[in-house]
Amino acid sequence: MTFAQEAPPADVAAAPAAAAETAEAAVAAPTDAAAAEVIAEATPAAPVPDKGDTAWMMVATVLVILMTIPGLALFYGGLVRSKNMLSVLMQVLVTFSLIVVLWCIYGYSLAFTEGNDFFGGFDRLLLRGVWDNVGGTFA
């Protein structure tokens, strides 16, 4: 029995390394052009996002937003007198709109790029480089 903090036994740790060495030797072995072409053809293609999954995530996100924003507005509106209800509804709407704009300006970049231990960098500031217009895909 081993725990997460303990190092694995030497023979268990050496098994994946030995398998990797034999795989490298098998790949490096063919020297003629025909064998190299077969290996190049066997290389897997880059993964393609499933359009159904992407569409479902977008629909689910829109449904959550359509449910949450009015819910927050009505909750906070219920905490004030009726004469201030419209003001609170507008404050929630403006706050949500501001958050969307800030997400597009720098939030995406901080969330999904390489950076330090706490947050990402500014490589995708203003959503720069997110869409590949030629291929019609997301980067």
Image (tube, rainbow, N blue to C red):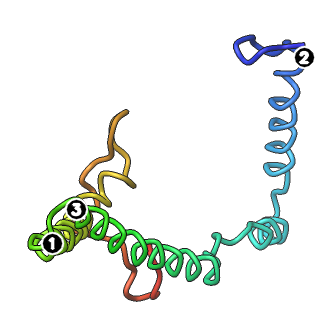
Total marks in image: 3
Choose between 82 and 101: the one closer to the eye: 82
Horizontal relation, residue 29 to residue 124: left or right:
right
Residue 25 position, x and y percent, is 83, 42
Residue at 82% x, 63% y is 32
Identify residue for label 2: 11
Q: Closer to the camera, 138 or 22?
A: 138
Residue corresponding to mark 3: 125
Q: Amino acid at mark 3?
A: Leu
Q: Earlier in the sequence, mark 2 or mark 1?
A: 2
Give SS at disc 2.
helix
Identify the mark nearer the N-term, 2 or 3. 2
Q: Amino acid at mark 1?
A: Ser
How packed mark 1 is, by other alpha carbons closer than 10 Å (few <14, some 14-19, many 20 or more), is few
Residue at 74% x, 66% y is 43
Dot 2 crowding, Cα within 10 Å, few <14, some 14–19, many 20+? few
Tell me whether the residue at label 2 lies in contact with that at label 3, contact meaning CB atoms closer than 8 angstroms: no
Q: Which of the two discs, 2 and 3, sits closer to the camera?
A: 3
- Locate the C terminus and report the quarter of the image it occupies: bottom left
The secondary structure type at the circle numbered 3 is helix
Query: Which residue is the site of mark 1?
Result: 82
Give the residue type that dot 2 points to.
Answer: Asp
In this picture, residue 62 sits left or right of residue 86? right
**Residue 1: x percent and y percent?**
90, 13
Label 2 – label 1 distance at C-alpha:
73 Å
Q: Position of residue 46 (x, y in %)?
A: 63, 70
> In what element is the residue under mark 1?
helix
